Image: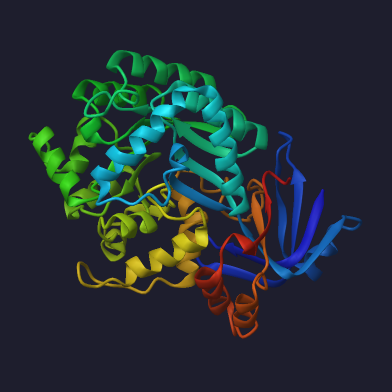
Amino acid sequence: MQAYRSAILRFSDDHQPVYETDGLLVVAANAQGRNVVQAVGDHATLLAQYPGVHVEDLRGRLIAPGFVDMHIHYPQTDVIGAPAEGLLPWLENYTFPHESRFSDPVHAREVAGFFLDELQCNGVTTALAFATSHPASVDAMFEAAQARGLRFITGKVLQDRHSPDGVRDQTEQSLIDTERLINKWQGVDRLGYAITPRFAPTSTPEQLRGAGELAAKYPEVWIQSHVAENRDEVRWVAELFPQARSYLDVYQRFGLLRERAVYAHCIHLDATDRALMRETGAAAAVSPTSNLFLGSGFFDYLAAEEAGMAYGLASDVGGGTSFSPFHTMLAAYYVGREGQSKTGTSLTPGELWWQHTAGAAQALGLAGVVGNLQPGQEADFVVLNPQATPLLARKTAQANNLAELLFALIVLGDDRVIERTVVAGR
């Protein structure tokens, strides 16, 4: 058993931030030997209940839930910052050439290790990630995540058409490989498998149908893909699937909308699409730095809320421009404020933080497991230093309340704020 004295941020069941200015977080192993939150609350009140427990004094710091990244491409680690005229040219000129190298297990392992280093130094403790179409890329990432004790979800990309040599797979073999990898990795330690069609245009109807059949056979696994990122892509899908009502309807027709199905972007949806997301339990991975970088559009927060659809935040590296959750939350604030293409809204600091922690976990179907600091949840958390830089120290010293403190961290924070990332209590 280990305890930490610090200011502590967590979230209530109704998504509101709960702030202990002088808190105590107690971590202990559960019956399965996994380190979980034993108790959290006011230091003076809790300490009397745990006499003799070792307490690390972290006053002056802020303990918060580890960040949850709902959509990221680990093979695009070296694509981040590549210039492009838009999504499709960016894929053709940078992404596919880089991804073709992941047939080499040595290369895949090296990138996987570097990628996880970046996630952890930015305070991300859970992620849903794309691998590539090569099974070796999946094994490399799962092995690296398992060695670190991470809660991590990934899967082999399915793309059997409209893709160059080196990343295009074969329909039947791709589905055989997917099922083999599900049986190898799903539920091992803290790992989960995601059935991963890249996006509708790069899969034949036969491959999408097979993916849907696997999703029905293995309801405990995740599904991840992209939908309605930009208008050119939407038009292309309409040409390829003329029988579908919309881009999102393509996935519905093949049985790929359900709980634990996560679709990146969800920008160019209509009211019927959003209602379908709610009805099926599918969730949106909002990717604001990527959408701004590629000029894709703006996620409509108010329409999503009105529809009752699930969503959370994602970095979307390498279209996304930073591994940092602070940069992602700030970009989400910009996207919310935009009021020319939709109705603008000002997301509160608590809402932004929730979207990248407990809200993202809930959207992934992991509520009560990660993303928050409530008793029984896995002990994934970060220790933040509000004085990490001179400007940040100056600003946070003037914070009059929690909202001002969190917003200062969002606007001015980066990986220097992450003093420690704790995964499964370690």
Question: Residue visible at 63% across and 64% down?
Answer: 417
Question: What's the colour scheme?
Answer: rainbow
Whether residue 241 is visible, yes or no, is no
Judge left or right: residue 396 versus residue 108.
right
Question: Residue visible at 19% across and 44% down?
Answer: 233
Residue 352 higher or lower than 204, as above or below:
below
Instruction: Using the rendered view, name the quadrant where residue 126 is placed.
Output: top right
Whether residue 52 is visible, yes or no, is yes
Question: Residue visible at 66% across and 37% down?
Answer: 148
Judge left or right: residue 289 versus residue 168.
right
Report the number of numbered marks.
0
| Residue 298: x %, y % from top left | 27, 61
Residue 179 higher or lower than 37, as above or below:
above
| Residue 116: x %, y % from top left | 58, 42
Instruction: Using the rendered view, name the quadrant where residue 321 is placed.
Output: bottom left
Q: In the depicted view, which residue is nearer to us: 230 or 307?
A: 230
Question: Residue visible at 19% across and 36% down?
Answer: 250
Residue 64 higher or lower than 260, as above or below:
below
In the rendered image, which quarter contains the C terminus?
top right
| Residue 170: x %, y % from top left | 30, 17
Judge left or right: residue 52 versus residue 255.
right
**Identity of the residue furthest to the right in this view:** 52
Q: In the depicted view, which residue is nearer to us: 370 or 315?
A: 315
| Residue 320: x %, y % from top left | 40, 52
Residue 300 higher or lower than 239, as above or below:
below
